[in-house]
Image (cartoon, rainbow, N blue to C red):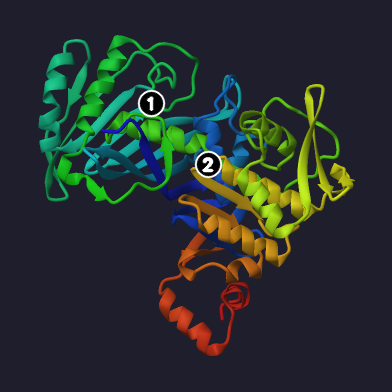
Amino acid sequence: MSHVMYVFVRKVVVRNFKSIGELELELRPGVNLLVGPNGAGKSNVLEAIRFARRALVEATSPYLPHVPDYLSPLDVIYGRDPRREVALGLGLELYGEVGGEWLSAYAEFTTYLRYRPQPYETIEPVRHVVKIGDTQAEIDRGGIAITAPKEHFDRALKWIEEYAKRIPFKLAEPKEEGGRTVVSYRWDMEAPLQLEGLRHVLWPGPRGRASEDLLACSQVAGGTLLPFPVALGRARRPRGIRLGLPPGFCLDDVLEAVRGALGRVVFLRHVERRAEPVPIAGGDVLDERGRNVAAVLFSYRGRFGRNPESVDRALAALFPGVVLEVRQLYNSALLVAREGDVELPPSNIPDGLLKLVVLMLAVDLGPSLLLVDEVENSMHARLLEYVVDVFNGLGVPVLLATHSPVVVDLVDLERIYFLSRGPEGTRAEAVQNPEELRRRLSEAGIAVSDYFFYTKRYGG
C-alpha cells in the first residue's frame, strides 16, 4: 500500500442536538445547500458538526465541549432533556492504494454523548459505534464489543487465542441475524479509553500510555474489523482529503480517519471586521468569524512568501487593482489593502472584500468539510457566483446554510435540502424527483429559489 489514506465525508447524522430530533444528510463534492425559514434549524446542523469536532478532537481539561458557545451542556440537548443521548455520526469513504490500484471501503462512526451533572456539569461521550461492512464495534468506558459474521469471527480466532489468557473475553452464542450467523464477543478494560494512550480510539481524557492489554485488544479488534478483499471497492482515483496515515480498512484506521476528518472541518459564520491588530499566534487556524484573518495571512506569507493563490486570484477577478498587505506590529498583525497609491486601513476595507478573503483562505486550508452559515452576508451577486463556482470545484463537501435566492439558483436541485421544524424537531427533506421538478418549474417559468422560498415553504 501507499503511505497515505484519503477520506471523503459522505454522510452526516445528527440526533437530539438542539432543535434536531433526527436528521441525516448525504453529501456530494462541492456545494450542498440547507434552505428553509428562520428558526428551521439550518445553523444547528452546522453547529452539530462543529460540536463533534470540539468533543472528539479539541478536548481539554476540564472537559467542557459546550464552552464557550453555550452556557450549559443542556443547551445542546434536544428539549434540554438530560435523559436524552446526543448522537453525532459520520459516514466516511476510505481510500488506500495497493499495487498501483486504489481500493475503497465505506465506514460509519457514531459517538453518543450524555449529560453529566457531577463532579462538574458537562456533556461527554459514553460510547462510540463503528460499522464497516457487516461488522460492528461498540466502544464504551468498560470495554469493546464486536459483532461480526461468523466467517469474520473465525478469522479473528488467532488473535483471541493468543491474548485470551490476559484479556477476559466474553463470547456469546452464535445467532441468526439477517440470514447470516453472527457472533458477538466482548472484553473489559481496567482503564478508560484514552485518545493519546490508545491512538486507535477517540476518547477525551488525560494524556498517557496504553497498557499492553489495551494494545492487545486493539489488535484483536483491528483484525476482526478488517473486511474481506471482496468487500473492498475499486476506484479510479480517491476523493476527499489526504491524511498522513498508513492506509487500511480496519477499526484503528476508521477511528484515525474520523479524527483526521473532524480535525480539518472548517466552520465560518458572520465574518467580523477587526480594525485593531490581532495577535500573530494562532495563525494556523482560521477563526469562525474571520477575526484573525491578518494572523492567518501573516502565517501563510511566512511559510510561502506570498498570499494564497486563491486569495490573489479572487481579488484580481472581483477587485482589480486592490492588493492585500499584512503589517507586523511587534507580536501582532494588521491587515491593510492598497488600491493604487491609496492605502485602505482595516476600517476602510469593503465588507464584501473581507468576506471574500476569509472564504478563499478557508479553501486554501484544505478542509475535509467546509461549513458556512449565511454565505450571502455582505456579498453582491457577482461575488456569490464566483464563490459558488470555486466551492463546486473542490473535491470535498461544502455545506452552506442560506436565505439567498442567488445561491439557490446557482445550485442543482440534487444538492438542496429543505429544512422545516415540526413537533419532532428539525427535519431535512431532499428533492425526491429532481428531473421531474426541474421540468415542471421550467414549464411554469418558476425559479428554483421561488419554489423553495415561497411555494415549498407555504405548501403550494
Residue at 55% across, 44% down: 48
Q: Quadrant of the N terminus?
A: top left
| Looking at the image, residue 37 lies above or below residue 61 | below
Percent position of residue 290, x then y: 71, 42
Q: Nearer the viewer, residue 352 or 88?
A: 352
Percent position of residue 360, x then y: 63, 48
Check disc 2 and give the amino acid type.
Gly
Q: Secondary structure at mark 1?
A: loop
In the picture of the structure, the residue carrying the numbered disc 1 is 201
Residue at 48% across, 35% down: 113
* 257 displayed left or right of 223: right
Q: Which mark is residue 109?
A: none
Check disc 1 and give the amino acid type.
Val
In the picture of the structure, the residue carrying the numbered disc 2 is 366
Percent position of residue 425, x then y: 54, 56
Count the marks.
2
Can residue 426 be seen here? The reply is no
Q: Secondary structure at mark 2?
A: loop
Q: Quadrant of the C terminus?
A: bottom right
Percent position of residue 321, x then y: 78, 54
Instruction: Examine the image and state in which quarter residue 379 appears.
Output: bottom right
In the displayed orientation, state which residue is furthest to the front: 341
